[in-house]
Image: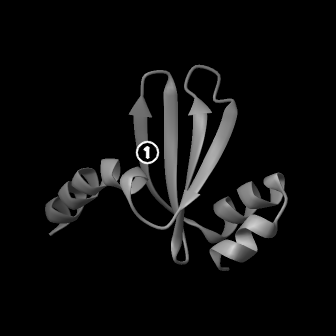
Amino acid sequence: MKLFEFLKLSEEEQYKATWKKGAYVDLYLKGNIAIELYAVNNFYVEIYYERNTTERLYKKTFKQGELLDKYLDRIHLKINSFF
């Protein structure tokens, strides 16, 4: 699935596609927000949750850039500790 096809889906279908077709990458905690990062083919989806209630708040989709930066050091450390 390409990003354009993903964005044509309804909001709920986008969440389901993320969980079904995406690969879970990492969890990022910021204050009362938990952010799950998924890789779906050639793009990423962040799903934002309220930490105390686990209520789903919203999501962001992107291919690269600033939103991905906060994960890079953490992913690099995980890869290096694996080898």
Residue at label 1?
27
Residue 23 in the image, given as x and y percentages of width and height: 53, 66
| Label 1: few (<14), some (14–19) or many (≥20) C-alpha neighbours in 10 Å | some
Q: Where the N terminus falls, by quadrant? A: bottom right
- The residue type indicated by label 1 comes to Leu
Q: What residue is shown at x 65% (from left), y 71% (from top)? A: 21
Q: What residue is shown at x 49% (from left), y 53% (from top)? A: 37
Q: Is residue 34 above or below residue 14?
A: above
Residue 9 relative to residue 55: left or right: right
- What SS does tag 1 mark? strand
Q: What residue is shown at x 38% (from left), y 60% (from top)? A: 65
Residue 10 relative to residue 25: left or right: right
Instruction: Say which quarter of the image contains residue 4.
Output: bottom right
The image's colour scheme reads one colour
Q: Nearer the viewer, residue 12 or 68?
A: 68
Residue 31 in the image, given as x and y percentages of width and height: 43, 22
Q: Is residue 39 above or below residue 37?
A: below
Q: Where the C terminus falls, by quadrant? A: bottom left
Instruction: Say which quarter of the image contains residue 58.
Output: top right
Residue 3 relative to residue 27: left or right: right
